[in-house]
Image (tube, helix red, strand yellow):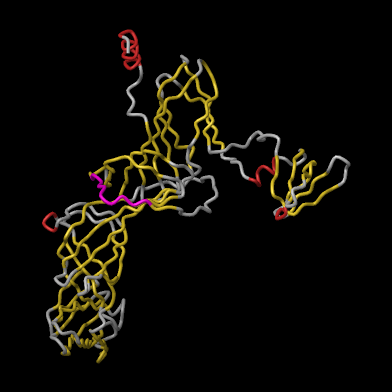
């Protein structure tokens, strides 16, 4: 490279605006929403001119477009989304001449008079009419692409540039059709230690692909107004799944949310579900919780796993909402699926509880043994809860009870724990193959 050329390139670099490295970055939210930031080199004519910005999402909210380029003013914007399709072409060529090839290879030339879902009608050169079934047509030939149809969604701009030439432009916009959630897999052993892994599952049905994109994820509930938005064809299907096992996200607080940034660039293809590892596998200590809540499950004891989201437990990071699937190792080394639950957004140093299912070997009965009307506004109930533990090991069952208004437990066979104004609990220890009975009397006013 000559010294003059090097100097010219250096001067050009100084004169250009300070943009980020050209490319695409995509920030995806939990709410069918994404923010796309696209930096491209674009050619501008001096003065007013029309400029086409292609490859935008079909689900774009065109009112959210932000354009930035040194000295260039965006005067007017149109969003063209009337895409080419066989149906659209037939609609545009009504009263125009086309050629139709039938299943025998014969070519019929004529003016297209009408097109329904199953039939087209042509008027040939001699004035006769031909009705052709769509299922018998092998090919339809058009002389050219009609005006108004485009091959991909396009922003059509009227811009004013004080100087002509190429320079970088930054365009950002919001689009629907993109969403993400976390998927967790926990494999527990006999000591209740769980090997916990997490995947980010990202769905792109926005109508556009983003190649070599910088990916960010926002965890949290962003408030949005609800303006009317254009409706597009949502009949899309997931075609592929990409799984990137060792990749990790960096995490930080961002306003009142949490931001996860993939430490490398990736391709986000339209109609694709992509999975990326959220963090390396962690071995967490869990605790098995047995709980009986008559108001929710009147004859079953539920089983949950609980663990602390802390650094001491190899976690200590904000966990985005998602589904947790739990497996257990068998003695032969295999893994069996034992249940799943939904996890809400969980800050660090908070407890996580995952409901697995119902305990098979713990039977329970609850009965109202007596009812007494003390006065017009006061009454008492005697409640009995029987628990039979048919397991080979002792368990503690948390019995959850609810009452509303002004209430008092006047006596009980076990100590109670008041959780809030409407809930109280008992810890009931049940020895192996034994029955234990909890009784209490509650007075309501």
Residue 294 picture location, percent across and down: 28, 80
Asked where in the image residue 28 lies, by quadrant, the reply is top left
On the rendered structure, is 433 left or right of 64?
left
Q: Quadrant of the C terminus?
A: bottom left
Residue drawn 50% across the image and 23% down it = 159
Q: Main secondary structure of the magenta part?
A: strand
Q: Is residue 246 magenta?
A: yes
Residue drawn 28% across the image and 47% down it = 257
Residue 56 picture location, percent across and down: 48, 37
Which residue extends farthest top? Answer: 4
Residue drawn 35% across the image and 20% down it = 17
Instruction: Say which of 236 and 297 sits in front.
Output: 236
Residue 77 picture location, percent across and down: 52, 30
| Image height of 350 relative to 171, above or below | below
Instruction: Say which of 45 and 231 sits in front.
Output: 45
Which residue extends farthest front? Answer: 105
On the rendered structure, is 34 left or right of 327?
right
Residue drawn 53% across the image and 35% down it = 154
Tell me the magenta residue range: 242-251
Residue 145 picture location, percent across and down: 65, 35
Instruction: Say which of 40 and 5 sits in front.
Output: 5
Instruction: Say which of 413 and 379 sits in front.
Output: 413
On the rendered structure, is 35 left or right of 311?
right
Q: Quadrant of the N terminus?
A: top left
| Image height of 395 relative to 82, above or below | below
Asked where in the image residue 80 lies, by quadrant, the reply is top right
Q: Is residue 67 magenta?
A: no
Q: How many marks?
A: 0
């Amino acid at each position: 490279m000559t010294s003059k050329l090097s100097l010219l390139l250096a001067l050009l670099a100084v004169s250009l605006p300070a943009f980020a490295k050209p490319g695409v970055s995509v920030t995806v939210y939990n709410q069918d929403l994404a923010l796309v930031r696209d930096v491209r080199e674009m050619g501008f004519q001096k003065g007013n001119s029309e400029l086409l910005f292609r490859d935008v999402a079909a689900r774009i909210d065109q009112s959210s477009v932000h354009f930035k380029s040194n000295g260039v003013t965006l005067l007017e914007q149109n969003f063209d989304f009337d895409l080419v399709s066989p149906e659209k072409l037939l609609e545009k060529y009504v009263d125009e001449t086309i050629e139709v090839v039938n299943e025998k290879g014969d070519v019929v030339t004529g003016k297209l008079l009408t097109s329904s879902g199953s039939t087209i009608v042509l008027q040939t050169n001699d004035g006769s009419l031909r009705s052709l079934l769509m299922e018998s047509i092998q090919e339809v030939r058009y002389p050219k692409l009609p005006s108004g149809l485009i091959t991909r969604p396009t922003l059509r701009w009227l811009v004013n540039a004080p100087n002509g030439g190429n320079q970088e432009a930054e365009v950002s916009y919001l689009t629907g059709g993109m969403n993400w959630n976390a998927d967790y897999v926990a494999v527990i052993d006999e000591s209740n230690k769980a090997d916990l892994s997490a995947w980010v599952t990202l769905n792109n049905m926005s109508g556009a692909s983003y190649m070599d994109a910088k990916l960010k994820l926002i965890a949290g509930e962003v408030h949005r107004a609800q303006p009317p938005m254009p409706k597009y064809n949502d009949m899309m299907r997931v075609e592929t799944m990409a799984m990137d096992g060792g990749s990790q996200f960096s995490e930080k607080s961002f306003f009142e949310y949490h931001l996860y940034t993939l430490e490398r660039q990736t391709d986000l293809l339209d109609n694709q579900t992509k999975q990326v590892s959220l963090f390396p596998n962690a071995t967490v200590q869990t605790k098995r919780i047995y709980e009986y809540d008559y108001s929710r499950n009147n004859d079953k004891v539920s089983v949950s796993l609980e663990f602390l989201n802390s650094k001491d437990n190899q976690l200590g990071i904000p966990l985005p909402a998602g589904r947790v699937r739990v497996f257990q190792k068998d003695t032969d080394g295999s893994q069996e699926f034992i249940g799943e639950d939904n996890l809400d957004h969980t800050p660090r140093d908070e407890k996580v509880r995952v409901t697995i299912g119902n305990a098979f070997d713990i039977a329970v009965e609850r009965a109202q043994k007596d009812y007494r009307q003390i006065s017009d506004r006061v009454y008492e109930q005697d409640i009995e809860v029987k628990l039979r533990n048919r397991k080979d090991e002792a368990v503690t069952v948390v019995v959850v009870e609810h009452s509303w208004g002004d209430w008092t437990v006047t006596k009980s066979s076990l100590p109670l724990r008041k959780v809030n104004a409407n809930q109280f609990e008992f810890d009931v220890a049940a020895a192996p193959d034994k029955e234990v009975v909890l009784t209490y009397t509650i007075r309501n006013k």
